[in-house]
Amino acid sequence: MFFFDKRAKICCCSFRSLQGIKIIQAAAGAGRTMLVSDAGRVYAFGKDSFGEVEYGVQGSRFVTTPQMVESLKDIYIVQAAIGNFFTAVLSREGCVYTFSWGNEMKLGHQTEPNDIQPHVLAGPLENIPVVQIAAGYCYLLALACQPNGMSVYSVGCGLGGKLGHGSRTDEKYPRLIEQFQALKIQPVVVAAGAWHAAVVGKDGRVCTWGWGRYGCLGHGNEECESVPKVVEALSNVKAVHVATGDYTTFVVSDKGDVYSFGCGESSSLGHNTLTEGNNRHTNVLSPELVTSLKRTNERVAQISLTNSMYWNAHTFALTDSGKLYAFGAGDKGQLGTELAAQRSERGAPELVEIDLS
């Protein structure tokens, strides 16, 4: 497992405490990072509780090296997701557990905001296996497997319509998003941005909903959508992957091409001004091909991006060949590459010198 350190002469560093442990998934969020191993163990470091901003909780401890989460040691975990006020994990059996933010039954349980014990996500998903979870700022999405196909459930804060039920009402328990049945879309990938969400269907169509600020929904405007809506501008693209951040969205096609839209802050959309004749900080209201990635002559397999444009937004692109490219804000060393003098961001993808093959 590697991390990027601005102070280090070599930007890419490894965790000594994880030597001999194979990490299969990493989740980075509000002040903490969680790592899942191939043995189903979870390791965490950073802030050990949530809620300072909303609840004024004091005395949070900061863990500076990865430590195994003891409360999960008897549960085989395959995925972790981090929101701003909570953490969620998914077990091998398809059960979802949440930590924190349980007061007023926000996540189906009644606990203190800094509670570090896992609680089963109560409600309909207790009896329906889940295959993927995605955490936004204050809500959670779950991709569930049912006899008639895949479906998506949402729970948490409903502001902006990001729960996808046609309203802005909060949901204390997971609720089925029914719109996919009307659209005849079987979801296969879910993504939860800070304030908006996206899904890739089995047929390659992309749906987005929630806050539409800066054009992050890709519908050519900045309107909110309270139910999933197909991104018509991608009608000729068969998507296989989608990633969402704070008002930004990336879509990867079956050909390995990447499209991005939303907030152009920090050049994190990858549209380089020098080669494309546009201001790379311009907001993009409809999907545009990230030609700077296409010029690498690599097929992109996955995109990972920060969940907040206010925290030095940056983006990583992982290729089929195991190469990692980075662009966006880099003033904290988060790109893993050196920046030119007096520069705080990189508008075009740069290869990160790390072996991920």
Image (tube, helix red, strand yellow):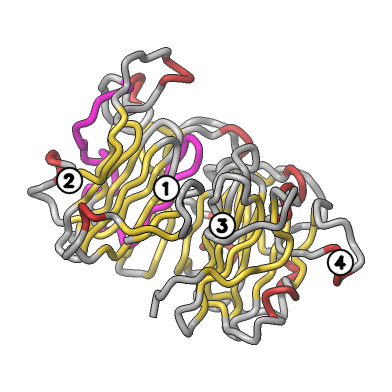
Q: Residues within 10 Å of mark 1 (few under 14, many from 20)?
A: some
Element type where label 1 sits in the image:
strand
Q: CA distance from mark 1 to mark 2?
A: 16 Å
Element type where label 3 sits in the image:
loop
Residue that carries the numbered disc 1 in the rendered image: 28
Residue that carries the numbered disc 4 in the rendered image: 274
Viewer-nearest of discs 2 and 3: 3
Q: Residues within 10 Å of mark 3 (few under 14, many from 20)?
A: many
Q: Earlier in the sequence, mark 2 or mark 3?
A: 2
| Front in this rendered view, residue 16 or 123 | 16
Q: Is residue 201 visible?
A: no
State the image coordinates of residue 79 (x, y, percent, origin top left): 30, 56
Residue that carries the numbered disc 2 in the rendered image: 68
- Compared across the picture, whether 352 is left or right of 274 comes to left
Q: CA distance from mark 4 to mark 1?
A: 31 Å
Q: Residue at x 56, y 57 (%)?
A: 335
The correct choice, above or below, for 328 with respect to 119 in the image is: below
Q: CA distance from mark 2 to mark 3?
A: 27 Å
Residue type pointed to by label 4? Leu
Residue type pointed to by label 1? Ala
